[in-house]
Amino acid sequence: MRDSEHSKLGKTGFGNGALYDAARPDYPDDAIDYFAAVFELNLSMHALDLGAGSGIFSRQLRPFVGRLTAVEPSASMRDSFRSANSDMEILDGSDISIPIDDDSVDAVFVAQAFHWFEAPRALTEIHRVLVPHGALGLIWNERDETVEWVSTLSRAMQWDTRQPYEVGKDFTDVIAAGPFTSVERVFIKHSQMLSREGLLRRVLTTSYISTMDREELDQLMASVRKVADQPVEPILLPYVTTVYTARAS
């Protein structure tokens, strides 16, 4: 996928914040606890959730910090965020344009979004808003395709040929050039319990699928339904969650 297509998809592929919030998984409690331990999160700290989407990660992180500010470029996502998160502020901004002062947050988190970022410019902007030696945490849920039916589902979704980013890419060197130090990457098992219809809604939140025309979408979803009809409900969709931690140099 060319850079221009990737950028366009990142901006247009998430236009239904309510569906995203209802269908996407949360993050493992072990991952949140890991962030809390590594960064010594406490109620005196101000955290930023960058690319916050509908607020799934923000809600999980909120009890661990004194203040949480979210930044999100999609208007639909911001609307969904506000409807469910009245105690957190969400601002219109992006990875390379964060509407927050220099040295103003203790920790920046990016959940399920860093692969859309212009990494070098974004890391410079993140570094700008962090206090000296501030914390950076990145997290992704990825379907566990070592499970046979999940691999079959991914092929029905055309994920093998149309995935908009490199799954499993190691961002360690990219982060270290940010400049950030003490970069660590860990993997945590996770799962999402879904009904059959819930699994279909989960598929519909995939960026390139959400932008398909009706004919193409109907054809793809017919293939997905054949896979979704096989597991017994409730369906346990397995994930591997990747977590990065780092400190601003």
Image: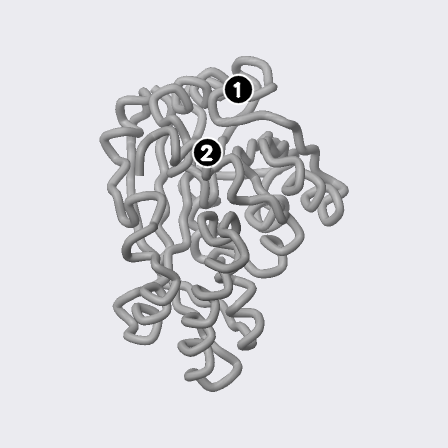
Q: Is residue 149 above or below residue 103?
A: below
Residue type at the position of mark 1: Ser
**Is the residue under label 2 in contact with that under label 1 (CB below 8 Å)?**
no
Q: From this viewpoint, which residue is outermost toward the front?
A: 215
226 and 39: which one is in front? 226
Which residue is located at x 52 percent, y 81 percent?
234
Mark 1 vs mark 2: which is more N-terminal? 2
Which residue is located at x 35 percent, y 41 percent?
244
Q: Quadrant of residue 239?
A: bottom left
Q: Quadrant of residue 66?
A: top right
Q: Is residue 133 above or below residue 113?
A: above
Q: From this viewpoint, which residue is outermost toward the bottom?
A: 232
Residue type at the position of mark 2: Lys
Percent across and percent down for residue 117 are 41, 31
**Which residue, given by chain and number where applicable, does mark 1 sit on?**
97
Which residue is located at x 46 percent, y 72 percent?
222
Could you tell me which secondary element the residue under label 2 belongs to?
Answer: helix
Percent across and percent down for residue 194 are 54, 73
7 and 78: which one is in front? 7
Q: Is residue 67 above or below residue 155?
A: above
**Which residue, given by chain and number where applicable, does mark 2 sit on?**
8
Percent across and percent down for residue 197 are 57, 73
6 and 97: which one is in front? 6
Which residue is located at x 62 percent, y 59 percent?
22
Q: In which quadrant of the rendered image does the C terminus lie?
A: top left
